[in-house]
Amino acid sequence: MTTSPLKIGFIGGGLDSAVGNAHQIACQMDHRWVLEAGCFSAHDTINRQTATQWGLDPSRLYTEWQELLRGEKGRLDALCLLTPTPLHAAMAIAALDHGFAVICEKAMATSSREAAEICAAIEANKGFFAVTYNYTGYPMLRELRQMIAAGKLGKLHLVQIEMPQEGFARLSQLDQPPQPQAWRLQDGAIPSICLDLGVHLHQMIYFLSGQKPLQVIADQASYGFFNNIKDNVMCLARYTGNLRSQIWYSKMALGHRNGLRVRAYGEKGSAEWFQLQPEDLVFNDVHGRREIIDRASGVELADQQRYNRFKSGHPAGFIEAYANHYHDLADSLLEYKQTGRYTSPWVFPASVAKEGLEMLEAMALSAQGNCWQTVATTMV
């Protein structure tokens, strides 16, 4: 790129967070962004240690996020929110009101009501806002989307998607139970597991199919160490385009570190992608032939130079997927500055995140009522 790196600031994402280091590395991997300011933690020691380790100018470190908004107004190209989900709405609205372009870690908010308030602030300020869904940065998952769009699978009938984890059930080597962050142990109208995992799966089905959820029937249960905190969710969903989906995500599935798997079935073929083998996309055609596709195969998208920092055979992983996403965020922000909008298929606006929260609310109501529930979506 001939443009200078865009200037970004972080709220949250300190050294003790789950996502900060991934964002710090990924946003700067392709020299599209440079981290220049931050309020990384409410804990002063962590805040200062983070700034020191990341080489931040001490004058650009803030002890309160509101101070950052005042001090960095007009100095940054974008502000990234990496705080716990319950804090996102207030911070996002304040940042938009101060004129910042906002990049928000998923989940955007804890409810569709909060999401609607953020959407109203975006509209009122004509602001740039995008939600990060890093898994869709994997090249072979993008290749699957391209295959579906090109009709290689034919009309899409079914998407099976799962994200089993064991974080609420696995003991430490000293037989100690897990110790999740406090906010993940507070279920609201949408259980925390849905805000953590479920939003990814909704977005991934949208990403692959472009279809909208219409009705869901779901089951939610608690099996792990934390009573009354949902840790296993299963759902059947009906979508526009006569598409069906089967969805499972869990934090009590012993043996699964992060078993994200996507299977797409169409009238001409099917395909499967598994995050722990991210370089391989398995395709099956209507005649029973089976093909393993990677970046060195006859692909339409995944062989682009931007996805090949290392040659095929040198696996790209989680951080690279994040970096691909930040590459697209930079392109989209530059387009937005020129035209007032962005058109990238790889960057996801607040409307997609809001629809996901509406779907998750419908799933919670379905589980409570043991019935099919209509998704009250207002996505446009």
Image (tube, rainbow, N blue to C red):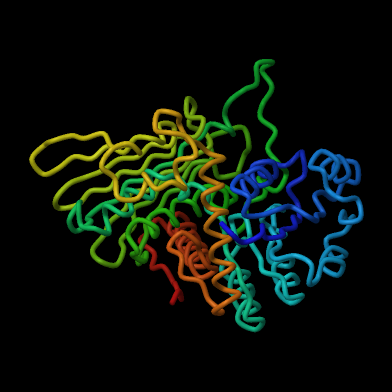
Residue 366 is left or right of residue 338, and the answer is: left
> Which quarter of the picture shows residue 331?
bottom right
Name the image quarter holding the N terminus: bottom right
Q: Residue furthest top?
A: 174
Q: Residue at x 87, y 56 (%)?
A: 60
Task: From this view, report whether residue 284 is shown above or below residue 374.
Answer: above
Q: Position of residue 30 (x, y in %)?
A: 59, 48
Residue 19 is left or right of residue 301, and the answer is: right
How many labels, in total?
0
Name the image quarter holding the C terminus: bottom left
Residue 233 or residue 348, whichever sits in front = 348
> Which quarter of the picture shows residue 272?
top left
Task: From this view, report whether residue 281 is shown above or below residue 169.
Answer: below
Residue 87 is left or right of residue 196, and the answer is: right
Q: Position of residue 85 (x, y in %)?
A: 66, 55
Residue 106 is left or right of residue 254, and the answer is: right
Q: Position of residue 125 (x, y in %)?
A: 66, 81
Residue 92 or residue 160, whichever sits in front = 92
Q: Residue at x 49, y 34 (%)?
A: 258
Q: Residue furthest bottom?
A: 124
Q: Residue at x 20, y 52 (%)?
A: 152
Task: From this view, report whether residue 30 is shown above or below residue 11.
Answer: above
Q: Residue furthest left?
A: 287
Residue 60 or residue 287, whichever sits in front = 60
Q: Position of residue 19 (x, y in %)?
A: 66, 44
Q: Residue at x 57, y 54 (%)?
A: 326
Q: Residue furthest front?
A: 2
